[in-house]
Image (cartoon, grey):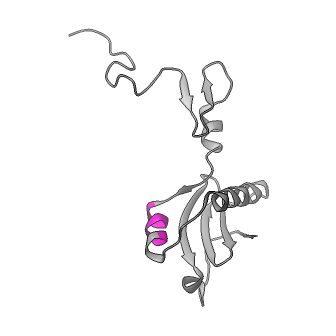
Amino acid sequence: MNEPIQVGRLYPGRLQPGILQQQSGKLAGSDGSATFKELLGHELVRFSNHAAKRMEQRGIELRPEQLGKIGQAIDNAAAKGAKESLILMKDMAFIVNVGNRTVVTAMDGNSMKDNVFTQIDSAVIIN
């Protein structure tokens, strides 16, 4: 009853101490090869619940290469010091929190018409 709890004992097979895994399959460990913050920074792009609902409602589907372009646009916005950015791509628009790489809302061409975008400090236009 007084046994110490060990990582992996409660949830065997789920977590290995000292190892974090990135989606690309590369491993980073406690040997200093990458910090947790660096690993999170390499995540391409996240979608908030609100953005996911809007994308579903508006029939917006993104291909992997489009996600890559959005990720690059976020990198470019971050390099310029942007915090909240409008990303325009063809007939789609995304409002992105640059700091945590999260799309907070998404619009299709019809939703963009006669719309005023507020609370942004930058815009990135990509093909």
Q: Residue, x 60% and y 54% (percent of image)? A: 45
Residue 106 lies in quadrant: bottom right
| Picture mark count | 0
Instruction: Name the residue furthest right.
Output: 80
Which residue lies at the image location 54% right of the left edge and 67% below the top edge?
Answer: 61
Horizontal side of 44 relative to 3 (left or right) equals right
Please provide percent x and percent y for residue 67: 63, 59
Q: Is residue 32 left or right of residue 18?
A: right
The quarter holding residue 89 reads bottom right
> In the rendering, at what x and y percent does residue 120 appear?
65, 70
For the record, the magenta segment spans 49-55
Image quadrant where one finds the C terminus: bottom right
**Main SS type for the magenta part?**
helix
Residue 86 to residue 72: above or below:
below
Q: Is residue 52 magenta?
A: yes
Tell me where residue 96 appears, x and y as whole percent.
Answer: 61, 63
Give the image location of residue 81, x and y in percent. 75, 57
- 108 up-or-down from 14: above or below: below
Q: Residue furthest top?
A: 2
Does 28 sit above or below residue 117? above
Residue at 60% from the left image edge and 68% from the top image edge: 95
Which of the 4 image quadrants contains residue 71? Answer: bottom right
Question: Which is nearer the eye, 72 or 35?
Answer: 72
Residue 127 appears left or right of 119:
right
Quadrant holding the N terminus: top left
Q: Residue furthest bottom?
A: 114
Residue lying at 32% horizontally and 11% vertically, measured from the top left:
4
